[in-house]
Amino acid sequence: MRRGAQSGVTLIEVLVAVTLLSLLTVAMLFAMHIGLNTFAKTNDKLMTDRRVGGAQKILAEEIDGIVPVMAPCLGMQLNPDAPPGTGQPFGFFQGQPTVMRLVSDFSLQLGWRGIPQILEFAVVPGEDGRGVRLLVNEIPYTGPPSAGRLCLGYAPDPISGLPAPQFAPVMAGPQSFVLADKLAFCRFSYLTPPQPGQPAVWAATWSTMGWPRGVRVEMAPLDPDGTRLQPIAVTAPIRLLRDPQAAYAD
């Protein structure tokens, strides 16, 4: 009588099964790797776009919250005939192509709910010397003397020849906040009041006592990328809602 056939698998069948399982596992891992990389790139682009859009919104709100402060110049006078620490109060505003100072109701930490801040904007070299970056310092505003301490004195303006306040340089520090980075350029310009028979023009330097009608911040990316939100020019009107000559209890 013939012995019954025994059930089982051969070595070839085991090798084929293991090979197919290995190929399936590799395919799944490869698909997961592609998916995770795509997710990381998309998230990075979204975060970059939010950062760029948020920085431009913050910059516009900081300028929009300007407070017209009349500050005394408390620094060393550049005019040797004037006594130290004296001088006619001036409208606290510094406008240069790469530096701007003003007092604003908008705070980076508390938004519109914070106390007024002295804002110092400056364009400084970027990381490793590539391009430039725009940073801002916040100094709590405690009254006109706190702003007047940043004035070094008065000197004739090279354009108008009239006495103009001279300011201390803006210093970058650990508390400085970078509003925009990896820029090819960044510059400020200021809208001058219209003269009789002439339209208002944008000037690279604000050399007039008082405040401009608007501020424009022009920026361009160091490495343009059409798939990302790029820094663009920010133009903010200056609306003076308080009388700078009147004393307020707050």
Image (cartoon, helix red, strand yellow):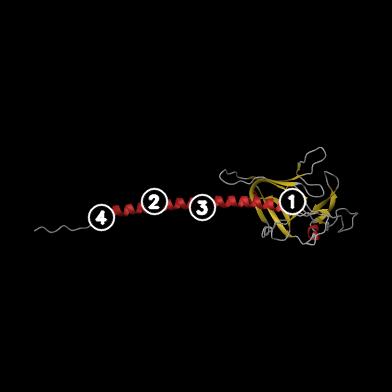
**Which residue of the protein is positioned furthest toward the right in this rendering?**
81
Amino acid beneath label 2: Ala
Mark toward the start of the polypeptide (4 vs 1): 4
Decide: is 85 above or below 123: below
Mark 4 or 1: in front is: 1
Mark 2 or 4: in front is: 2
- Which residue corresponds to the image point at 41% horizontal and 53% vertical from the top-left? 29
- Which residue corresponds to the image point at 39% horizontal and 51% vertical from the top-left? 27
Residue 240 horizontal side relative to residue 182, left or right: right
The residue tagged 3 is 40
**Which residue of the protein is positioned furthest toward the top in this rendering?**
197
Mark 2 or 1: in front is: 1
The reply to whether discs 2 and 4 touch (Cβ–Cβ < 8 Å) is: no
Residue closest to the eye, 137 or 46: 46
Residue 159 appears in which quarter of the rendering?
top right
Characterize the local packing of mark 1: few (<14), some (14-19) or many (20 or more) Cα atoms within 10 angstroms: many
Distance, label 1 to label 3, CA atoms, is 37 Å
The residue tagged 2 is 27
Q: Secondary structure at mark 2?
A: helix
Q: Is residue 130 visible?
A: no
Amino acid beneath label 3: Ala
Residue 75 drawn at (x, y percent): 83, 58
Mark 3 or 4: in front is: 3
Q: Quadrant of the N terminus?
A: bottom left
Q: Secondary structure at mark 4?
A: helix
Distance, label 2 to label 4, CA atoms, is 24 Å
The residue tagged 1 is 100
The residue tagged 4 is 11
Residue 166 drawn at (x, y percent): 81, 52
Residue 81 drawn at (x, y percent): 91, 54
